[in-house]
């Protein structure tokens, strides 16, 4: 990377010097390397020509002819037109000719102009020189180029008709720029420019596809490339587990594996099965004790009695009484998991499991051709910890089925597979060897977005009846299902076109699995962590169904939630917030792109606490007024955050009977932006401070005395100006009021 950056800096210095000396910035490659720091890399100036030749050899290897442009070029030549090349380049005409014929042996032209040979670019006088030397009427000339300034405006300025042929749209180029930045941040130790043609493939597939909806375009340009790379990984996994005497079957786990299945079917035909087997069904079917059900329920956020009955098919009286003890009969899944061994007989679960296990196996027999002869089953899925694979292992063992199971996952929590059966295997395309475990967990915290756009339109499986799947009601709105279908259509279109385009351009982006995995990661991470405004508008209103036997829908994005968390708990704590919202990175991005990048840095363990966390910077006297008119003064600490905001936290107890809190703004922030006032409540100060249950006080309930206010902006009119915060009624002992301000002027101190 240092070599690359020094090469870039050398070119900048060479062009700057040429501009100062000759009035034009065009230079030859040797002039560029004359500014290179040879000694730093153990070289001498005698190595200059070797460096030039090495770079040219790399250009020859990487340069490809655009088939569309080549076709037009040859058509015009056959039609009798004079055709040639005009290029802004540091390669002289001889080397430029070698590059062109390296891409197309035998290629001929009528003229060839390299800017470095003439000391002028297309934006300057190169077009004029071409017209003069060739004796051509500008009005009869036609120029095709990919640079708006040099090719289009430069040609038009000389009366030449231009045609713009961009390498990529501005939107796609912006995505590539963000992906490169994330690649260098998260996939360390690999040069970001070497992607084996992955981005070229994306550009050309996009250029050949007709303009369609934004959802289709997202699938075509982002999701399709990710899933096509994963498809190549799945194909390699199937080859790896094959061998003499083995009969390998491939199954894509529904619902999240639905898009992967569609792409496989498009590229490979009907050589796989779509298996609607989820965590809930597989865990219960594998139960020979209470523990699998306990494990399942411990991961459920909230659950009610009807949902529990739907999962286990029975409702023991003690369980019914347990639900009745909670408000509205809705209990935390974790509390139910803790209490369950005392609420029902394990034998009931074992009997239920045996029945479901029989139906599950009958379904697998029907869906997987030659199931009885199968020796190895590859399970493809978005992945994570392999819970379905492990549960099926227990099911097969209990039924005496000697079928090895092999996971092929887009993302894998690799430390979760140490307890895998010895004969089984797992592999994650994006493994902890591609990104760090910190980064992996950040991705999975935001993976709900990918799940929603990859999954089928059907509800989640709850049982089987012969070869029929019994599904839950799909609670997602029809508009969301239609949006996901359109995104998937774009992804399938990319996969269907990519093979032919790759052949046309002699590209093989999946040949090196480690390179493909890193660039797949950069593409996926960019979508999940640094979405652009168009993607936020398209995807921000999606809802996530938790797929654990409930009909609950959780919001994908909630920017107010993040803003309130930052106000009450600080940036780092906001970055660790539990769901919902399901797309935490999207919620940060809704605040601003810089907030999203800070979240990304935190997830990559690159956000130093001593830089971005708060530190005490001042104190201020707070007025606490009781309902009876009595008042006391308390000292509160003012903290400054790494973003330059001020935080004041005011803890009060219910026993104090506080009705109003008075904050003297002139004492620490006479003018500023008030981002909000929040409340956290609990029975203890520590629990309140750590609580994620943050409530924002409505802006119209705050009272500004002696303060001019316009939206978030305020300015105190006198030293007596203050912010009056009405105390909220609470049933808990402690309430912490947090005030967040960006100061726009200094306090009088």
Image: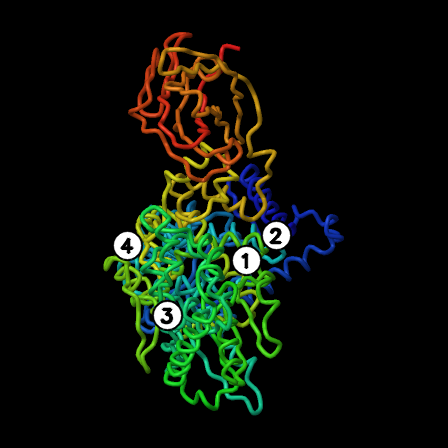
Residue reaching furthest to the front: 317
Mark closer to the chain start, 4 or 3: 4
CA gap, disc 3 and disc 2: 42 Å
Instruction: Classify mark 2: helix, strand or loop.
Output: helix
Mark closer to the chain start, 4 or 1: 4
Which is nearer the eye, 401 or 201? 401
Marks 3 and 2: CB-CB under 8 Å? no
Q: Is residue 325 visible?
A: yes
**Mark linked to residue 185:** none
Image point 46% across, 32% down: which residue? 568
Q: Horizontally, is 737 left or right of 453 in the view?
A: right
Which is nearer the eye, 175 or 489? 489
Instruction: Classify mark 3: helix, strand or loop.
Output: helix
As drawn, 94 above or below 148: below
Q: Which residue is mark 2?
A: 4
CA gap, disc 3 and disc 1: 32 Å
Question: Mark 2 packing: few (<14 Cα in 10 Å), some, or many (20+)?
Answer: few
Q: Which residue is mark 3?
A: 258
Mark closer to the chain start, 3 or 2: 2
Q: Which residue is mark 4?
A: 139
Mark closer to the chain start, 1 or 2: 2
Question: Mark 4 packing: few (<14 Cα in 10 Å), some, or many (20+)?
Answer: few
Q: Which residue is mark 1?
A: 193
Q: Is residue 233 visible?
A: no
Which of discs 2 and 4 lies nearer the camera? The answer is 2
């Amino acid at each position: 990377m240092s070599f690359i950056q020094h090469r870039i800096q050398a070119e900048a210095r060479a062009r700057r010097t040429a501009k100062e000396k000759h009035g034009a910035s065009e230079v030859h490659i040797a002039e560029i390397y004359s500014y290179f720091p040879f000694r730093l890399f153990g070289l001498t100036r005698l190595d200059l020509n070797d460096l030039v030749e090495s770079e040219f050899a790399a250009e020859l290897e990487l340069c490809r002819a655009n088939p569309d442009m080549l076709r037009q070029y040859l058509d015009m030549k056959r039609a009798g037109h004079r055709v040639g090349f005009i290029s802004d380049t540091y390669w002289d005409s001889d080397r430029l000719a070698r590059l062109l014929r390296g891409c197309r042996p035998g290629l001929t032209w009528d003229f060839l102009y390299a800017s470095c040979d003439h000391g002028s670019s297309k934006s300057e006088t190169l077009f004029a020189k071409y017209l003069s030397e060739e004796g051509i009427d500008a009005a009869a000339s036609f120029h095709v180029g990919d640079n708006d300034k040099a090719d289009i405006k430069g040609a038009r300025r000389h009366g030449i008709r231009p045609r713009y042929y961009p390498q990529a749209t501005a939107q796609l180029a912006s995505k590539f720029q963000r992906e490169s930045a994330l690649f260098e941040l998260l996939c360390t130790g690999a040069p970001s420019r070497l992607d084996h043609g992955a981005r070229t493939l994306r550009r050309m597939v996009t250029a050949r596809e007709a303009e369609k909806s934004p959802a289709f375009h997202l699938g075509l340009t982002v999701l399709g490339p990710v899933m096509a790379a994963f498809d190549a990984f799945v194909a390699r996994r199937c080859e790896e587990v094959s061998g003499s005497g083995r009969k390998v079957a491939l199954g894509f786990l529904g619902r999240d594996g639905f898009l992967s299945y569609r792409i496989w079917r498009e590229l490979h035909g009907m050589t796989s099965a779509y298996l609607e087997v989820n965590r809930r069904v597989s865990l219960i079917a594998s139960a020979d004790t209470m523990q699998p059900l306990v494990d399942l329920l411990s991961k459920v956020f909230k659950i009610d009695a009807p949902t529990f009955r739907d999962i286990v098919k029975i409702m023991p009286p003690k369980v019914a009484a347990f639900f009745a003890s909670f408000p509205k009969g809705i209990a935390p899944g974790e509390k139910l998991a803790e209490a369950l061994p005392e609420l029902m007989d394990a034998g009931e679960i074992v009997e239920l499991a045996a029945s479901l296990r029989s139906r599950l196996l009958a379904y697998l027999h029907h869906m997987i051709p030659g199931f009885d002869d199968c020796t190895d089953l590859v399970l493809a899925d978005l992945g994570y910890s392999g819970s379905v694979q492990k549960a099926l292992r227990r099911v097969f063992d209990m039924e005496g089925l000697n079928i090895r199971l092999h996971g092929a996952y887009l993302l894998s929590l690799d430390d979760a597979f140490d307890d895998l059966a010895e004969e089984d295997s797992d592999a994650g395309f994006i493994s902890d060897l591609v990104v760090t475990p910190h980064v992996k967990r950040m991705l999975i915290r935001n993976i709900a977005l990918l799940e929603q756009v990859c999954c089928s339109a059907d509800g989640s499986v709850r049982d089987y009846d012969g070869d029929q799947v019994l599904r839950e009601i799909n609670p997602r709105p029809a508009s969301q299902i239609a949006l996901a279908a359109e995104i998937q259509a774009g992804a399938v279109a990319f996969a269907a076109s990519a093979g032919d385009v790759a052949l046309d351009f002699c590209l093989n982006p999946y040949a090196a699995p480690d390179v493909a995995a890193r660039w797949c990661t950069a593409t996926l991470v960019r979508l999940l962590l640094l979405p652009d405004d168009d993607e936020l508008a398209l995807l921000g209103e999606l809802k996530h169904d938790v797929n654990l036997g409930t009909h609950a829908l959780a919001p994908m994005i909630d920017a107010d939630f993040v803003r309130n968390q930052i106000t009450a708990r600080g940036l780092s704590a906001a970055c660790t917030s539990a769901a919902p919202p399901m797309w935490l990175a999207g919620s940060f991005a809704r605040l601003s792109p810089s907030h999203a990048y800070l979240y990304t840095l935190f997830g990559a363990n690159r956000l130093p606490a001593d830089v971005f966390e708060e530190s005490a910077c001042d104190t201020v006297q707070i007025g606490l007024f009781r309902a009876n008119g009595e008042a006391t003064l308390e000292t509160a600490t003012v903290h400054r955050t790494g973003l330059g905001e001020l935080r004041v936290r005011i803890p009060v107890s219910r026993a104090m009977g506080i009705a109003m809190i008075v904050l003297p703004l002139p004492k620490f922030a006479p003018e500023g932006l008030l981002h909000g006032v929040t409340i956290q409540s609990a029975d203890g100060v520590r629990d309140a401070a750590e609580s994620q249950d943050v409530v924002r006080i409505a802006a119209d309930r705050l009272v500004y005395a002696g303060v001019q206010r316009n939206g978030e902006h305020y300015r105190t009119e006198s030293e007596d100006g203050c912010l009056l915060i009405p105390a909220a009624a609470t049933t808990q002992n402690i309430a912490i009021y947090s005030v967040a301000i960006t100061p726009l002027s200094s306090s009088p101190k």
